[in-house]
Amino acid sequence: MAETYNGYCVKCREKRDFSGQVEESNGRRMAKGSCPTCGTKMARILGKAASPVK
């Protein structure tokens, strides 16, 4: 499921919208994708994953 996120491209030195997938590790979610202009890997930390309600 690819969604659009806004992140900073280090190579272009600009904020750009990129499409990526959400990966989860250590209770944190991160969107990973690539820059549509130059193809460099981009990432954005989304925050903690929602814990199940007890």
Image: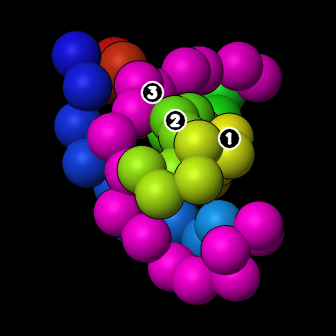
Q: Secondary structure at mark 1?
A: strand
Of residues 39 and 1, the one nearer the viewer is 39
Of residues 5 and 49, the one nearer the viewer is 5
User: Is disc 2 surrounded by few (<14), some (14 to 19) or many (20+) residues within 10 Å?
Assistant: many
Mark 3 = which residue? 22
Q: Is residue 7 magenta?
A: no
Q: Amino acid at mark 1?
A: Lys
User: Is disc 1 surrounded by few (<14), some (14 to 19) or many (20+) residues within 10 Å?
Assistant: some
Mark 2 = which residue? 33
User: Is disc 3 surrounded by few (<14), some (14 to 19) or many (20+) residues within 10 Å?
Assistant: some
Q: Are marks 1 and 2 in contact (CB under 8 Å)?
A: yes
Residue pictured at 65% horizontal, 66% vertical: 9
Magenta part of the protein: which range?
Answer: 10-26
> Looking at this rendering, what residue extends furthest in the bottom direction?
14
Distance from disc 2 to disc 3, alpha carbons, whole Å, reads 9 Å
Q: Main secondary structure of the magenta part?
A: strand
Q: Who comes first in sequence, dot 2 or dot 3?
A: 3
Looking at the image, is mark 1 or mark 3 nearer the viewer? 1
Quarter of image, res 21: top left
